[in-house]
Image (cartoon, grey):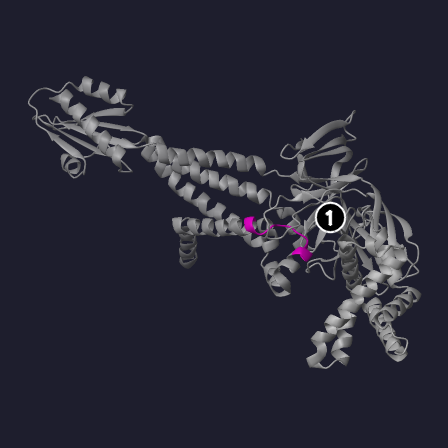
Amino acid sequence: MKSTAFNSRKINQLLSSMSFAVSMLVFLGIASIIGTILKQNEPYENYIIKFGQFWFVFFEKIGLYDVYQSIWFLTILLFLVISTTLCVTKNTPIIFKDFLLFKDSLEEKSLLSFTHHLVLKNTKKVNLSRVINYLKLEKFKVREKSKDNGDILIVAKKGDFQRLGYIFTHVGVVVICLGGLLDGNLFFKAQELLGYKKIETLDIPASKVPEVSRLSITNPSFRANMTLAEGSSDNVAFVRKKDGYLVQDLPFKITLKDFRIEHYSTGMPKSFESDLIISDPELSQDITKTITVNHPFSYKGISIYQSDFQDGGTNLDIKLWNLLNSNAPQKINAKIFEKIKLDKDQLTYEFNDFRKFNILNLKEGVKEKPRNVGPSVTYKIRNNSGQAREYISYQVPMLIDDRSFFISGMRETPQEEFKYLKIPADKKGSIAEFISFKEALQNKILIEMVAKKMANRSVKSNNNLSVKQSFEDSVNKIMTLFVEGGFSNIAQNIDNNIPANEKEKAVQAYLKIIDIASIELYKNHFNLSDKEIDQSAIRFIQEALNAYSDMFLFGSPYYFELTNYEQKEASGLQLTKSPGQFWVYLGSLSLVLGIFSMIYLHERKLWLLIKAKGGAIIAISSNRKNIDFELDYKKVSQAIKKIIQ
């Protein structure tokens, strides 16, 4: 029994010690820093991309992706509450006792031991009422005591509310931590540990999520998200958890009546707001409310915040240009968040996002104001084996180095940067001229005509038929290599067939033939004379050749052209139920009051011993000795000295 009592006393001493409480505060501060720096409750794919598989698993195991609701964080809060509560419980009676106590038992020897004391010699009778009145004017509380030997001791003190700052501060910490525990969703954690609740990881409609992955309307605290397209409504929100989610049922239905967004001249979002309709069976009439960023609406203890915005299912008109042949473009009607399967090519288009504004800086390393480059569509192309590439296509041509290009990007995985295909726009700002030139390149008859024309021009003598034929065959071969695989195919052919010491010369010759043949092809195809082929046309041909070559690295047989759209926007809402919020605010107020009391209230204690035989001793003390105390000591002691003498 004695051993148990001893251990309990040791544990109590540890938990109520200042060092333990400070340690908990330090751990809490470190955890809060981590939670601030590392964005919380992101999809796990984002963390895998950012940290890699090894560190992702390590950070996931120690709960860094949901710091404020992790077991170890809540445990620190709990221990801090226990430690601080024990400190307050142990010291509050002492503080109140000292608050009410006037130490009137001090003797002359004790007063002389004070650092700040003053001995006065006086033979006159002291006017006690004047001394007491002065002390009261200086806001001192005064008590007078007569001793057995005839001496009179006056005890005065002020600023003792400063000691209450200790209580306010510690109580504030306790209340804030309790508020944090209330918002820590302990109810769900207990249910999860007991197996009553389970995180859903499958991408299924909310209506099909099983009861084990749903949170009832009585759930005491949560932070959930809801996305509503204009005109749609819902009575459930989604709580993101680890690698999945939970469905939070709501006691009311939310309808998005209208969503509005304002932009700066650059296209950057300026402000956005949502007109919401709250429908509750308990109400005779619906509630209509407009929410904006930092101006939420609260109903039944649930605060609805305007958190973001996204696409709500924009309708798209698309042309798919075949890059491998001269077929007419396919026209399809698509919708964001829907899929379209092209059975002919066994490809599935998954449309993920539409953006009306894209703010980009097109000149890397150059200080230029970012500008709006117009609408874009993000989509995936998935083959019949399930593999997918992600693409982004911009609707209008971008001006790059004073030339206009249609831009489309591709990446194999989300970890990679987009690799862009740049197709030159024609004078009308369309893709038509490139498509027509591409079809000319893929026309074998036209290539043969150009090759024959170049051979006749280069070898004018009829006696050199074999040389002429050889040159014509070379042009045909080089152009065929380029048409079938671009510049990389040319490079591979040179590597395989040309000696190392002649490769550089061969590269120059091949490129020259491609340039000349392409110009001839362009002239013949568009019925142009030599005079009409100016530098602008030559530059267009070179850019078109580069784009044609890059097509083989594009990963798709189609070029995606967005011709028109009907935008439909969606509002991103965050719904929070936070019963601990009031207590956190109350605790913060108590903490501020406590810190204010301890810093700005100065405790002063004064003893004035008037001896029966004549003379007096003044002693003053303070819990914090600083310049202000020195000034107060001089002021008060000199004033009393003047009254006495």
Q: Is residue 196 visible?
A: no
Q: Residue at x 32, y 35 (%)?
A: 98
Extreme residue in the bottom direction: 499
Q: Is residue 622 left or right of residue 274?
A: left
- The residue nearer to you, when weighing 147 against 87, is 87
Q: Is residue 459 left or right of residue 51?
A: right
Q: Position of residue 509 (x, y in %)?
A: 75, 72
Please identify the quarter of the rendering in which residue 529 is found.
bottom right
- Mark 1 = which residue? 398
Q: Is residue 414 left or right of residue 483?
A: left
| Image quadrant where one finds the C terminus | top left
| Image quadrant where one finds the N terminus | bottom left
Q: Position of residue 634 (x, y in %)?
A: 19, 29
Mark 1 falls on what kind of element? strand
- The residue nearer to you, when weighing 371 against 15, is 371
- The residue nearer to you, when weighing 343 against 46, is 343
Q: Residue at x 45, y 47 (%)?
A: 83
Q: Is residue 75 left or right of residue 21?
A: right
On screen, residue 79 above or below 139: below
The magenta segment: 36-46
Q: Residue at x 61, y 46 (%)?
A: 368
Disc 1 residue type (three-letter)? Met
Q: Position of residue 87 (x, y in %)?
A: 41, 44
Q: Does the magenta segment cover residue 14? A: no
Please identify the quarter of the rendering in which residue 260 is found.
top right
Is the residue marked by circle 1 packed among few (<14), some (14-19), or many (20+) residues within 10 Å? many
Q: Residue at x 77, y 80 (%)?
A: 497
Total number of numbered labels?
A: 1
Q: Position of residue 190 (x, y in %)?
A: 64, 51
Q: Is residue 232 visible?
A: yes
